[in-house]
Image: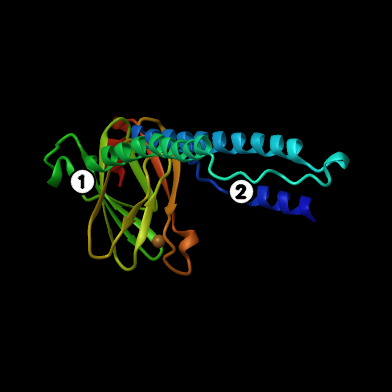
Amino acid sequence: MKKTGWILTLFLLSGCSLRVLDPASPYADKITRLIYLSFGIMMLVFVVVMILFVHFLKKFHETSDRVDEIPVDESGNRKLEITWTVLPVLLLVILAVPTVTTTYQLTSGASQGEGGQDKERVIIHVKAEQFRWEFTYEGGEVSYDKLVLPLDKEVELRLTSEDVIHSFWAPNLAGKIDVFPDKETRLVFTANKLGDFQGKCAEFCGSHHALMRFETTVMEASAYETWLQDQ
Ligand SMILES: [Cu+2]
């Protein structure tokens, strides 16, 4: 039964087309580094705790000559108390500093060049509705459930919703961003890898939420222009 459970889990996971740890933009690359950092810290804590656990199991397990032994009642070990207070604080600082600075770096891009003053930036309007994505490009071209982006060009997505709250998530390119019916949110990133990347709505938004997927295609700037003309 246990084996069947594992096989089923692997089978279900194999259905995931989202590749979270495969960055195709500096934005996604920064997030990936944060994931590796927190995973590294987690593994360090896990391994140290497991080593201590096994060590103490061996050291203090009951043996025939120790059956009646009563352990010494120790209270207040200053050294140990300082160690297990300082170490977790240190680990949290190592995790918190890059997390906070990265978060500020990534969100500051959306407020710079406010109002599209930055002429180099490609502005695409994203409209979410139950249950599809509509992308409107600078010349008024529209595509549904397919976002096309030029390579190595800074892109600014301006997102709004027609109905409920959705969440735009293309893990190869950027982090999740909420999409609201009465407020515009922005996402700024630069795709630096050619190819097709999967994205989906990451906020439960109704009966067909699971089908609210989209594909992102990153193409050379010249091919992007041609594609736009074909729309
Ligand atoms: Cu949705």
| Residue closest to the eye, 58 or 126 | 58
Other residues around mark 2 within 10 Å, as few (<14) / some (14–19) / many (≥20): few
Residue at which label 1 appears = 138
Q: Residue at x 61, y 38 (%)?
A: 49
Q: Residue at x 37, y 49 (%)?
A: 176
Residue type for callout 2: Leu
The disc placed on residue 13 is 2
On the rendered image, what quadrant is the N terminus found in? bottom right
Q: Is residue 195 visible?
A: no
* Image quadrant, ligand 1: bottom left
Q: Position of residue 144 (x, y in %)?
A: 36, 54
Can you name the residue that lies furthest to the right here?
64
Please report whichever mark, 2 or 1, sits nearer to the chain's N-terminal start: 2
* Residue 45 appears left or right of 57: left
Residue type for callout 1: Glu
Q: Secondary structure at mark 2?
A: helix
